[in-house]
């Protein structure tokens, strides 16, 4: 029988304590296993290495341009499909044009940044990936939230959102700070 508890520590490390009862112990006596603690702390302190953030701001801007171009490219066949559906439905489906780009962008981000590589194709071209400060992986929900908060902050703050990265140690933007993520160099 195992129970897992988690508590935050310095450098956003997650200390995981596993209590287990083994045949060698008295019934109910806890045994501490710190393997997961060392692993989580190592992942969190790895994100403090300055080499991970060299040139990240420039690479992020480059990856944004690549990703934006890819989303626009993906929207062309979708727009043609909506056009054909609009003709078949006597114009009713043409209302889908209003949500076409946001839906494509959300699906794009969910499957790429929320996937195994933890990066969009533009980020991979730039040699970047998204990392959570607690050492866990980025799931599709967090990836979509990351993208939506980025677009919301850019809509409100325009390009001034990039100024936040000048004052943070990990060159994080506003949405990175809110979500506990950092964009780091992958190579």
Image: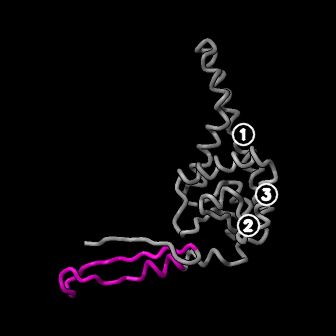
Residue drawn at point x = 67 percent, y = 68 percent: 186
Looking at the rendering, in which quadrant would you find the N terminus? bottom left
How many numbered marks appear? 3
Which residue of the protein is positioned furthest toward the top in this rendering? 90
Question: What residue is shown with label 1?
Answer: 73
Q: Nearer the viewer, residue 44 or 164?
A: 164
- Looking at the rendering, the stretch of residues picked out in magenta corresponds to 12-41
Residue 128 placement: quadrant: bottom right
Q: Earlier in the sequence, mark 3 or mark 2?
A: 3
Q: Nearer the viewer, residue 173 or 36?
A: 173
Q: Name above or below for residue 10 compared with residue 72.
A: below
Question: What residue is shown with label 2?
Answer: 171
Q: Name above or below for residue 139 compared with residue 23.
A: above
Which residue of the protein is positioned furthest toward the bottom in this rendering? 24
The x, y position of residue 130, in whole percent, is: 63, 62
Query: Which-is-in-front pick, marks 3 and 1?
Result: 3
Q: Residues within 10 Å of mark 1 (few under 14, many from 20)?
A: few
Q: Nearer the viewer, residue 150 or 39?
A: 150
């Amino acid at each position: 029988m195992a129970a897992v508890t988690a508590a935050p520590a310095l450098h956003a490390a997650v200390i995981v304590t596993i209590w287990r009862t083994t045949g060698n112990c008295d019934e109910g006596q806890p045994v501490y296993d710190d393997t997961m603690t060392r692993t989580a702390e190592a992942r969190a302190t790895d994100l403090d290495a300055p080499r991970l953030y060299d040139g990240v701001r420039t690479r992020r801007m480059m990856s944004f341009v690549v990703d934006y171009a890819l989303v626009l490219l993906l929207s062309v066949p979708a727009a043609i499909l909506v056009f054909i559906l609009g003709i078949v439905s006597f114009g009713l489906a043409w209302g889908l044009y209003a949500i076409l780009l946001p839906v494509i962008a959300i699906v794009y981000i969910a499957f790429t940044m929320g996937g195994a590589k933890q990066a969009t194709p533009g980020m991979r071209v730039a040699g970047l990936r998204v990392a959570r400060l607690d050492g866990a992986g980025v799931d599709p929900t967090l990836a979509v939230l990351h993208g939506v908060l980025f677009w919301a902050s850019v809509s409100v703050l325009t390009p001034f959102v990039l100024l936040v990265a000048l004052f943070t140690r990990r060159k994080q933007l506003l949405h990175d700070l809110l979500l506990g993520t950092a964009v780091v160099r992958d190579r």
